[in-house]
Image: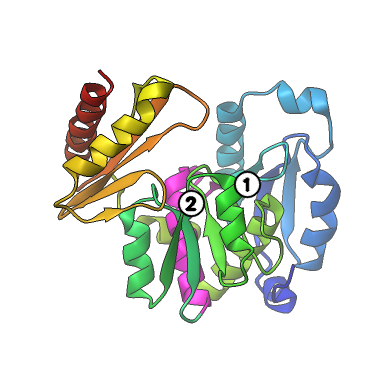
Amino acid sequence: MSVDAERLRSRSFKVVLDYSFGAASIVMTNVLAKIGANVLAVNPYASTTGATGEDLDTRVKVIGDLVRTSGSDLGYVFDPDGETAVIIDDQGIALTSEQALLVLVKLVCAHYKKAKIALPVSVSSEAERLAEAAGATIAWTKLSAANLMEVAGSGKVDFAASQEGGFIWPAFLPAYDAAATLVHLLELLGESDHALSALLADVPDVHVAHEAVPTSWERKGAVMRGVMERAKDLPTVLVDGVKVIYPDGWALVLPDPALAITHVWAESTSDVEAQRLVAIHAGQVAELTR
């Protein structure tokens, strides 16, 4: 991966890592040494038994406590497969997947001139607002990791992210990589000269709700046609499922590719309004399944 190692060495970040007994422990020691990071490592060896035997929430809390007591810049809990991770700020607070996505979008927009970012259509509109404010553009993708990686590998994207904590740095590898995310995050934090907690405080609250509606396989097509018909007088996005745009939010109706259910997501100005939008569209789906 290509980062400004000299800048990182001069910044000398202090980080607390939990390798989750995964393969990242094999490669990260050398990488972090090259960028001059001061590292406190937990579970720093590969072990299948260890990786499957510990509770994630407990380990995140432990790392958060260590970040606070050691005065570190951030904490990072790798997933055992090394694809995703939980990011913990300098106050020991774990970022949700949505918060991590918005923070990274903000940092990427500051780093790349007119950045191009790929995101699934179910991601909060706050990401689009952050991008537009910085002169960046969003390429909306399907929710599947395969489609997100395909778009990321097109050569036209600087950064891609999923709602599940997976981040892609196409110039390095068009696939989820938690190790690359950590190094790029440190570089971007160094450039911003702000603590992660300060960046998190500046990220807007997100109000997204979700409901799964039982839908028989033979009714899925009829359900989607019915949803499109009912939304014919409203703006829609048809990248994946039917996304209906409202003045104060949106609702996305999408049949599950593997289960006999239809997903309904919605975002609005508050949790109550998001739940109201979800309820409206979930009710429509339930009606159309009959």
Location of the N terminus (image quadrant): bottom right
Mark-to-mark CA distance, 1 and 2: 12 Å
Which residue type carries mark 1? Tyr
Choose mark 1 or mark 2, whichever is in front: 2
Above or below 149: residue 2: below
User: In the image, which residues are magenta?
Assistant: 87-112
**Residue toward you, 137 or 223:** 223
Q: Determine which quarter of the picture holds residue 220.
A: top left
Rendering colour mode: rainbow
Helix, strand or loop for disc 1: strand
> Secondary structure under badge 2?
helix
Q: Which residue is mark 1?
A: 76
Q: Label 2: which residue?
A: 100
User: Quick one: 40 or 161, which is closer to the camera?
Assistant: 161
- Residue 54 lies in magenta, yes or no? no
- Residue 108 in the magenta stretch? The answer is yes
| Position of residue 239 in the picture relative to residue 15 (left or right) | left
What residue lies at 40% left-to-right and 22% top-to-bottom? 218
Observer able to see residue 72: no
Answer with the quarter of the image where residue 35 lies. bottom right
